[in-house]
Amino acid sequence: MKRTAEVVIVGGGCMGASVAYHLARRGLTDVVLVEREQMLGAGSTGRNAGGVRHQFSNDANIRLSIESIGLFERFKEEVGADIDFHQDGYLFLLSTPASVEMFTANVALQRRLGVAVDWLDAAGAAALAPGLVTDTVIGATFCQRDGIADPNGVTMGFARSAQAAGVTIVRDTEVTGVLVESGRITGVETSAGTIAAPVVVNAAGPHARAIGRMAGLEVPVDPYRRHIFIAQPPSPARRWDVPASRIMVIDFESTFYFHREGAGLLFGMGDPQEAPTFDLSVQWEFLEQITPVAARRLPALTDAPIARAWAGLYEVTPDANPIIGAARDLPGFHLITGFSGHGFQHSPAAGRILADVITGRDPGMDLAPFALERFADRRPGGERYVV
């Protein structure tokens, strides 16, 4: 393993891989990416639903989406990997006047930034997603350029391109300490030895708080478990009344969502009672909470057997906005974490922005909404569309 580098990246998910890729694009290849698992993307990246959307409530997040989805659309040409990207759209279902009011303001913001978002009534929403019950829906929004992509394809595409340019990727190696001397970063300790480096990137996802503490910084990121279930058709002889496309449907009030996954249907829902945890075991009793919500919105799920299920972790900040940029109080320490459930889809833009910061370029974006210090300064803002 290399003992010196210009940059060490802690974490080999989509964020770490994106930073490595964009650093290499800027000519900085003396980089070591350290991943504690045997495979890249084995953590939160490999356990998410693959959704990609423009529809956010926060100006900065919409801008991240515009850039990121643009790269997803060109990924094969620019990065050289197939990411199985399907732009069948995101459909948000709204059932309360308060939600309609909030979405009205946010759709106006999205449109001002150049995103084409349609307003639909209940009938229009039902027409886009066969089998959907919209009797309580009073409004809906739809963006055709939203869609579903393959997280593993994106992560490995970034990683392979970075490696080809000269970046070193070390797997099955754990960072056990962050070295600080005279108030600045000097490297990391790992299970395979020390790597001296003036720049360390915390891309550790749900484990970002622990990496921050190694450097003497408090990083307000907590892990929250989210479940994903895959239903299969109940019988080859029976008609299964579900959408044929991969449209992502989200019932905003309950956070129940679903989209096609091969011949089956992927679905899930947030649990407001869930406490922070690193436990990835599937809590099958939670399925009992989802079932009545799912049956009301998509009756075809009522008799559909569950083929498999898994749990992943959201890395959540207090305002549901990510942390991207340099730590003000610790020169050489950079962060790209806390995406609160929308990290995969923002990895292209976030990695590019941090690579610009590290190499001294103008990132072309106000990073105040993403600064670590915003929590101490109690700056207003945050993201409302967390699913």
Image (tube, rainbow, N blue to C red):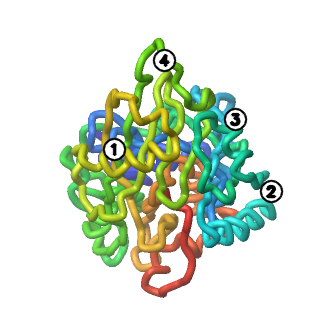
Which of the labelled discs sits on residue 238, or is there none? 4
- Between circles 3 and 2, the one closer to the viewer is 2
- Between circles 4 and 3, the one closer to the viewer is 4
Which of the labelled discs sits on residue 43, or is there none? 1
Tell me how far mark 1 sits from mark 3, CA to CA: 26 Å
- Between circles 2 and 1, the one closer to the viewer is 2
SS under mark 4: loop
4 or 1: tag closer to the N-terminus: 1
Other residues around mark 3 within 10 Å, as few (<14) / some (14–19) / many (≥20): few
4 or 3: tag closer to the N-terminus: 3
Other residues around mark 4 within 10 Å, as few (<14) / some (14–19) / many (≥20): few
What's the residue type where badge 1 is placed? Gly
Which of the 4 image quarters holds residue 314? bottom left
Tell me how far mark 4 sits from mark 2, CA to CA: 43 Å
Image height of 187 relative to 143, above or below: below
Picture residue at 61% right of the left edge, 48% below the top: 134
Query: Closest to the observer: 200 or 384?
Result: 384
Q: Which residue is mark 2?
A: 114
Which of the labelled discs sits on residue 74, or is there none? 3
Tell me how far mark 2 sits from mark 1, CA to CA: 33 Å
- Between circles 4 and 1, the one closer to the viewer is 4
Residue 44 seen by the camera: yes
What's the residue type where badge 2 is placed? Gly
Image height of 260 relative to 176, above or below: above
Picture residue at 38% right of the left edge, 59% below the top: 315
Tell me how far mark 4 sits from mark 1, CA to CA: 37 Å
What's the residue type where badge 4 is placed? Arg
Residue 181 picture location, percent across and down? 29, 72
Residue 264 picture location, percent across and down? 46, 26
Residue 138 picture location, percent across and down? 67, 59
Query: Closest to the observer: 54 or 100?
Result: 100
SS under mark 3: loop
